[in-house]
Amino acid sequence: MSNDIAAGLYIHVPFCIRKCPYCDFYSVTDRSLISDWLTAFRQEVSLYEGRFSSFDSLYIGGGTPTLLNGSQVTAVMESLWSTVSLLPDSEITLETNPDDLTQENLALYRQAGVNRVSVGAQSFHDEELRYLRRRHTARQTKQALSMIRAAGFDNVSVDLMYGIPGQTEDSWIKSLECALSFDPEHLSCYQLTIGEGTVYGEMAAQGRMVPLEEEKERRFFLLTSELLTERGYLHYEVSNFARSESYFSRHNRKYWQHVPYLGLGPSAHSFLNSTRWWNTRSVTEYCQRLAQGGSPLAGEETLSEEQYFLEALYLGLRTREGIDKTLATGHDCILDQLQSAGLVRVTEERIIPTREGLLVADSLPLLFTN
Ligand code: SF4
């Protein structure tokens, strides 16, 4: 199993100090497992020696990767450098929680090779952060962003969230403005989703929490896109904005374009040659299986042509790169309707969603499959 295209590498660090009520990413709060995870991670990396030709992006996510100290991140990087081919100009992103950052660990992360920092700010209002049960305050995020700049990072992404109960358009604009005052190269603006299996999901099922109304959803989305575009950001994917093309997330674009990627760690997913496979979610099982010389795989699927086509539509229509026109062959009538409704723009080779199109991106592919 090898491939000539530079792939993306994802590492799932499955630890958090406590669980946020909206989060459905896999993580545990027992940090005594970190050293076993690190040992198992090294074993898992070695399973992939020679299976991907090279990587030009690495994303260390989770969970809360900043629960690893500088020397643990260095240990992760050393096992990668010695086992897989991480190209010299790779984009290396570390997901961070504002209250974990210090000048010392930032310097060590940088020394270890991290060149892009993603900051989980979510909001610059303490009452909203308390609602989300985040550990940090707005003040800590501002301090973290200043420290990140002082540490010399020149590629910074800020995560923000809208649709938080009690949040107004005014408070959202203030959060955006506060983030913008640090001139981030990239912003990810997500709507709070209420997923099954989360605390908020249970509350919603019991009628104790009401999801955002569609009209409000629409207003937050359009407001965000208009404001950030006015400030010179490119709205290049439903939730993502960059100061220029060079700051588009190289790593995430691999997911959106069916470029191969390898995911390491509990619950991580990988993709190569139309085949997707994934690891067991349980960190203890992950560690046990690798300690016994086994594999942490939990499942695998090979996409049929039809599944691949459908995914290409779903993923492509969420981005401003859109989809190849040939994917819509035989659907001229639908295409005309979407153009007249202002949802897509059609060029000689591509079908590109407009801002209004991005707003309904998830429902567009269905029109091409009937
Ligand atoms: S949102 Fe982040 S910090 Fe909160 S539980 Fe999920 S992974 Fe952990």
Image (cartoon, rainbow, N blue to C red):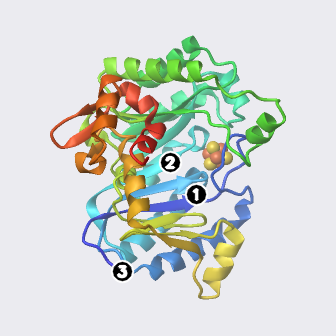
Q: Disc 1 to disc 2, how far (Cα)?
A: 11 Å
Give the residue number, with chain letter if any, for mark 2.
95
Q: Earlier in the sequence, mark 1 or mark 2?
A: 1
**Coordinates of residue 100 in the picture (x, y in percent):** 59, 44
Q: Quadrant of residue 305?
A: bottom left
Q: Earlier in the sequence, mark 2 or mark 3?
A: 3
Residue extending farthest to the left is 348
Give the residue number, with chain letter if any, for mark 1.
68
Number of marks in the rendered image: 3
Three-letter residue code for mark 3: Met
Pointers 1 and 2 in contact (C-beta within 8 Å): no
The residue positioned 34% from the left and 30% from the top of the image is: 338
Closest to the camera, between mark 3 and mark 1, is 3
Three-letter residue code for mark 2: Glu
Per the image, label 2 sits on a secondary structure element best described as strand
**Coordinates of residue 292 in the picture (x, y in percent):** 64, 87
Per the image, label 1 sits on a secondary structure element best described as loop
Three-letter residue code for mark 1: Leu
**Coordinates of residue 192 in the picture (x, y in percent):** 61, 33
The residue positioned 77% from the left and 29% from the top of the image is: 209
The residue positioned 47% from the left and 82% from the top of the image is: 47
Q: Is residue 209 above or below residue 86?
A: above
